[in-house]
Amino acid sequence: MLSFLKYLILPICLFSPSRKSLRNCFGIYFPYICNLKLIQNSMPFSSFGIAPFSSFGLSPDLLKVLADQNYTKPYPIQQEAIPAILKRKDVLGIAKTGSGKTASYVLPVLTNLQGNTASKNRHVNVLVLVPTRELAVQVQEVFHLFGSALPERIKSLAVFGGVAINPQMIALQNVNILVATPGRLLELVESNAVHLSGIDTLVLDEADKMLNLGFKEEMNRIIALLPKKRQNLLFSATLSDDISSINQILLHDPVVIKIESEADNIDLIDQLGYFVSEEKKGPLLRYLIKSKDLAQVLVFTSSVYKADNVADKLRKNGIDAAAMHSKKSQKARTDALSKFKTGKLRVLVATDLISRGIDIEFLPHVINYELPRSPKDYIHRIGRTGRAESSGEAISFVTPEDQHHFKIIQKKMGKWVTMIDSENLDLKGY
Ligand code: AMP
């Protein structure tokens, strides 16, 4: 309900004649600079009002690559950023890695470039500044993946320090999109290997990290070399004071998009852990489902075999359950998911791989029958329960072998989980 209200309130706040007083009433939507148009959204799996990629006006060749890549629908940041960038608006995106922010600018920037690539040699059209070599490579790969599907030849290149500069100087012939770390870019500019006066789109990706790494001066020097008239896209995981001040200097009437990450929702989730032996996991699962009368539970296992096995045993014990994993046919997966969503299936047992495609707005209970490999996956799994201002419960089964790993997960998450010893429970008969 609250998430629905926010979509009602936001347009009123933005367009009402007495915007100021409304903003004061609903200050949560104007935490930043008052004149910005702020769009808040949550992580990739909210299904509220999702428009398909095909509705944005992206190049049809890009739609084909999206389908090939299994990008079935836009993530929230893509939903908001793509139309704004296509309209040549400036954008401030507050979003972490993993939110889909790269494609949110790569797709519209490539579409905008179609028919506009003519420039003198060594004059690039698009400049993407990034903090690290790894991100430079990653972003360039995404430009290459989508750009190579377009009829017009678009050349992208990543340049970064810590490696020889000469090959980069040579490769800078006829580049349209340059992804660069600030220090190396300045070296290349100083040796006339590249000119920035033809830039019509500037992207600052992970701007907060660039500032943390001490690139502020370099960034200012680079920005001073750019033509005044250009589109600016600023992405940052946080909105610090430094980012706000860059944003005021750099962006004109920007569309501001804030994507909450799953980690931000952690406080909404009641987390519990059960110390349990491998053999007792099955009885413990059935005990929890029955004694707590859980109505809709997503259970995670780490293998296909285990998912099938857990679902079988639940069914044999009279609990309606289905497994969902990569070895199931698409039809079986879709059927199981739609039954689960509509409350006709009580327990869905899934592997991590498949969990990424599970599009459920809010889940009351998630059980980690087996722990995920990484803390990131743990947050991703349990993040399903803390959505849209609702609280949920996440339960993890921890065997003696898992204890060290679970400590690492908790440390990375920055939160300790209450542990219960299943030895003290009466699991007989489950
Ligand atoms: P990013 O935040 O840009 O690093 O993206 C995180 C991951 O999500 C990358 O592996 C992308 O390939 C993937 N991704 C981005 N957008 C989508 C989408 N709409 N559907 C499925 N996967 C996506």
Image (cartoon, rainbow, N blue to C red):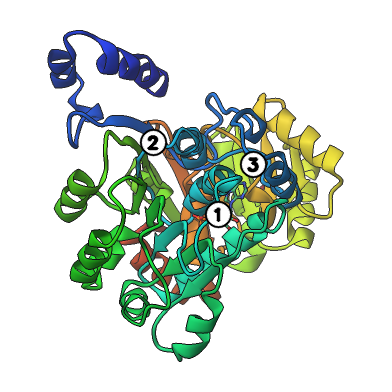
Secondary structure under the numbered disc 1 in the rendered image: loop
- Label number found at residue 42: none
Question: Could you tell me how far apart the alpha carbons at marks 2 and 3 are, in whole angstroms?
Answer: 32 Å
**Residue 112, image x, y percentages:** 54, 43
Position of 282 with respect to 185 (left or right) is: right
Give the residue displayed 63% in from the left and 38% down from the top: 73
- Quadrant containing the N terminus in the rendered view: top left
In the image, what residue type sits under mark 2?
Lys
Q: Which residue has dot 2 on it?
A: 89
In the image, what residue type sits under mark 3?
Ile
In this picture, is 28 found above or below 111?
Answer: above
Which is nearer the eye, 346 or 24? Answer: 24
Q: Can residue 364 be seen from the camera position used here?
A: no
In this picture, is 171 found above or below 22?
Answer: below
Give the residue displayed 42% in from the left and 60% down from the top: 127
In the image, what residue type sits under mark 1?
Ala
**Residue 97, image x, y percentages:** 44, 57
Position of 43 with respect to 189 (left or right) is: right
Q: Which residue has dot 1 on it?
A: 118
- Label number found at residue 358: 3
**Residue 286, image x, y percentages:** 64, 46
Q: How many marks?
A: 3
**Looking at the image, is mark 1 or mark 2 earlier in the sequence?**
2
**Looking at the image, is mark 3 or mark 1 earlier in the sequence?**
1
Question: Could you tell me how far apart the alpha carbons at marks 3 and 1 are, in whole angstroms?
Answer: 43 Å
